[in-house]
Amino acid sequence: MPCRLCRCVMSTLWLALLAALPSPAPAAPQSRPAEMEEAEPIDMTILFIRDPLVHKDLKLDADQETRIETLLDENDGPLFRARNLPPREFKAKADAILAGIEKELEQILQPQQRVRFDQIMLRTRGLSGFLQPAAAQALRLTTGQRRRIETIVLASQRGRESSGKWVVSNADGDERRPGLSEILAVLSDEQRLTWRGLLGPGFDVARLRPLAFKAPEFREVDTWLNAKPTTLAALRGQVVLIHFWTSSDVNCTRNYPAYRSLQTAYAKKSVTFIGIHTPETEDESDAETVRRKAAENKFTFAIAVDNDKYNWDAWGNQVRPAVYLVDKRGFVRFWWYGELGGKKTNGEKILRARLDALLAEKTGQATTKAN
């Protein structure tokens, strides 16, 4: 299994989807079969309805906040588990789930709140917002204008892809932002006024939390080793590193040095390591064998024995080994499939950087700026 970093639900992944950018994996094949080609981009901006800054701006009451949180909690799991589907299947699945969220929000938000939320969502789309159907229609873009704007947006996306960074910023604000002044120059005076009207009052989208899905809670664990039973809810305020493994798989064993190194390096920091042992064969399902091999390899972190694959399925995991990082609020922010070692992957080095970034975040508000 080739190693690659998947930046889940952080801005550098999900906002890349919003902007029709490819996922910024460290390496991509030169070509791939037609069935693996990327589908149309998925617009997940509606998930910003979870952010406290949006709640404050919309002046949501307590009942609305509770209903929205319940709605998103119910849909986080299905969306997160769908991530490994082929692109077109993932889009179909995600579009259906997001349409359901949209329908429910119509019942939760007041009309004026819905209008304001549409304005905020348009801001989060950045330059690509000019090409959104509703915005393009309101602006009455000509065919020539649309083509020129598409060229500018594509050039901006390529620049972000080459830099490996994405920063959400107000599409009406800093005209030094690459591409914005060029697009505004394409528009007439009347169109520019219309655009500013579509955006509504100012809103600093750069302060929004990264789009992320709540990590699935541990469930039906057969046995806990090296620790008492725990939950992710009990670990709020900690950064949690979760890795799926099995004791006899050669790819998993190649990650053992990295696990020991990380275990030692972060022993006195607010990081909790949890190994979810999901066996491939019946021989690997014996808890005492897992305990013995963990001791032999000096693993002191908690191990959840997942013989019936309840947690494997809840996470939609398909690979051993796989490492996930959960932030202090309980949201999945990064994951890594495959081996961590090797000069080409630098997996352990990357994980350390991500752990440090999550440790540095304040629990109240995270930035959408990619590190």
Image: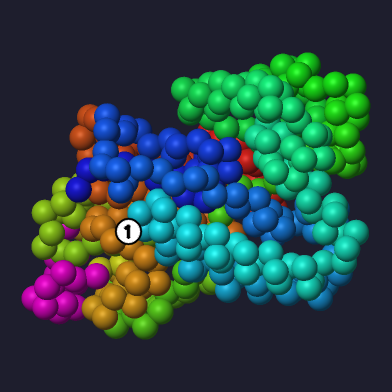
Q: Quadrant of residue 248?
A: bottom left
Nearest to the observer: residue 80 or residue 105: 105
Q: Residues within 10 Å of mark 1 (few under 14, many from 20)?
A: many
Residue 108 appears at what percent x and percent y? 79, 71
Residue 163 appears at what percent x and percent y? 49, 23
The answer to whether any part of residue 83 appears in the image is: no
Q: Which residue is mark 1?
A: 243
Q: What's the residue at 27%, 29% (across, down)?
A: 30
Residue 21 appears at what percent x and percent y? 50, 36
User: In the image, 16: left or right of 150?
Assistant: left
User: In the image, 14: left or right of 301?
Assistant: right
Nearest to the observer: residue 318 or residue 186: 186
Magenta stretch, residue numbers: 278-297
User: In the image, 366: left or right of 183?
Assistant: left
Q: What's the residue at 81%, 46% (across, down)?
A: 119
**289 in the magenta segment:** yes
Instruction: Say what amino acid the circle numbered 1 marks.
Output: His
* Residue 123 sits above or below residue 296 on the image: above
Q: How is the image coloured?
A: rainbow
